[in-house]
Amino acid sequence: MLLAIDSATFRASIAVHDGGTLRGECTWEAANAHTVTLATHVAELLRQTGIGVADLKSIAVCIGPGSYTGVRIGIAMAQGLALSQQLPIVGVPTLDILAEGQPPDDGPLYAIFAAGRRRIGYAQYQFQESGWQAVTEVALASWEEFLAQIETPARVVGEIDALGRKALETLGTALTVPPAAWQLRRAGFLAEIAWRQLRKRPRPGQAQAPKPLTPLYASGGAAPC
């Protein structure tokens, strides 16, 4: 049983996944209340699914970039659980989780997270045999700066606010913006990525202490959301 935790931005998400079935998932707008809401939501999700901490066999967590505070809260909880239970832990970048939930496409995909101060963080992805793969580093930009970098036609997904929607409309049919449900960065997809990585790892003969994770930050340092 794997617990997935993503609190990298103002929208948080958690999930439990047994390797074959998504047993439960919860996504909510945490705003600046990650410290208050994350542990409560994890406890409630485990209660609702009938899963105890002792039933967990691995942990997955979003390692950023995103909100400085949000990223660190998620990693701290994930590492605390992993250390206390001697569980393997998998760290996954923010935008990889978002790209995981998008359908195949021949054109470029731009995945976005809210970086605060009217900025966004973004990276370009291309669909390959193994799925969506990042082909650029994460960069910070205003919406105007982002539009100047887009290679069209393209698909844009992620945390798009009213200002962003207005800016993207200026490119008309050159851009595809999926429905709101596809814009969510869901922990269920974080869990899917983590399970793939865990299956590739050698299985040690005995429990080992989880290795510390290093948070990722975009160039210029993402501001708190």
Image (cartoon, grey):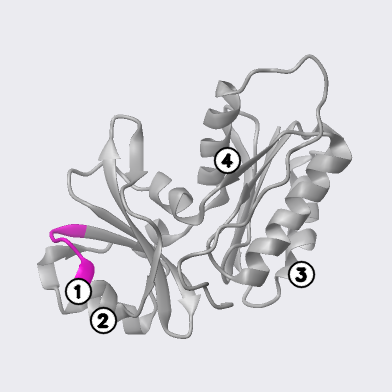
Q: Earlier in the sequence, mark 3 or mark 1?
A: 3
* Within-10-Å neighbours for mark 3: few <14, some 14–19, many 20+: some
Q: Amino acid at mark 4?
A: Ala
Q: Give the spatial CA distance, label 2 vs label 4.
A: 34 Å
Q: Quadrant of residue 202?
A: top right
Is the residue 33 above or below the residue 122 in the image?
A: below
Most foreground residue, 36 or 91: 91
Q: Residue at x 56, y 58 (%)?
A: 216
Q: Residue furthest top?
A: 205
Q: Which residue is mark 1?
A: 148
Q: CA distance from mark 2 to mark 1?
A: 7 Å
Residue 61 spot, x, y in % from top left: 64, 49
Residue 9 is left or right of residue 18, and the answer is left
Q: Position of residue 62 (x, y in %)?
A: 59, 52
Q: Is residue 197 left or right of residue 164?
A: right
* CB contact under 8 Å: marks 2 and 1: yes
Q: Label 1 is placed on what type of residue?
A: Ala
Q: Earlier in the sequence, mark 2 or mark 3?
A: 3
Disc 3 designates what residue?
35
| Residue with the mark numbered 4 | 191
Tag 1 secondary structure: helix
Q: Which class describes the residues within 10 Å of circle 1: few (<14), some (14-19), or many (20+)?
A: few
Neighbourhood count class around disc 4 (C-alpha, 10 Å): few under 14, some 14–19, many 20 upward: many
Residue that carries the numbered disc 2 in the rendered image: 144
